[in-house]
Amino acid sequence: MNLNKLFKKEVEKSKKEKMKEIVSALKEATPIDTGAARDGWTCDQNSIMNDVEYVDALNSGSSQQAPKHFIEKTLLSFSGIKPKGS
């Protein structure tokens, strides 16, 4: 295996580990009633998603269990993640 392929493989491995770490943190920060929103977090290559229809409402502060914008606060707690735009 050449050095370039080895490097790409290690970068991909590191990226997958970081994505799993972020998903785990988001699950921990998501308030629980039925558990659907917490279980809704998934990652696929370069994207982290939650398709539960009310996750935006939770993030807007509809739950007393989590602060407003818990998603953004969780993401910004990781080094290297910065908001896009101003």
Image (cartoon, rainbow, N blue to C red):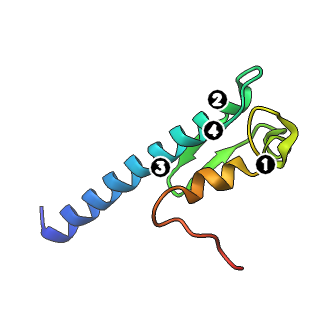
Quadrant location, the N terminus: bottom left
- Which residue type does callout 2 highlight? Asp
Quadrant location, the C terminus: bottom right
Q: Which structural element holds mark 3?
A: helix
Residue holding disc 2: 39
Q: CA distance from mark 2 to mark 3?
A: 15 Å
> Which sits earlier in the primary sequence, circle 1 or circle 4?
4
Q: CA distance from mark 4 to mark 3?
A: 15 Å
- Which residue type does callout 4 highlight? Ala
- Which residue type does callout 1 highlight? Lys
The 10 Å Cα crowd at callout 4, few under 14, some 14 to 19, many 20 or more, is: some
Mark in the foreground, 4 or 3: 4
Q: Which structural element holds mark 4?
A: helix
Check contact, mark 2 vs mark 4: CB within 8 A.
no
- Which residue type does callout 3 highlight? Met
Q: Which structural element holds mark 2?
A: helix
Residue holding disc 3: 19
Mark in the foreground, 1 or 2: 1
The 10 Å Cα crowd at callout 1, few under 14, some 14 to 19, many 20 or more, is: some
Residue holding disc 1: 68
> Which sits earlier in the primary sequence, circle 4 or circle 3?
3
Residue holding disc 4: 29
Q: Residue at x 82, y 33 (%)?
A: 64
Asked where in the image residue 38 lies, by quadrant, the reply is top right
Q: Residue at x 67, y 34 (%)?
A: 40
Q: Residue at x 42, y 51 (%)?
A: 18
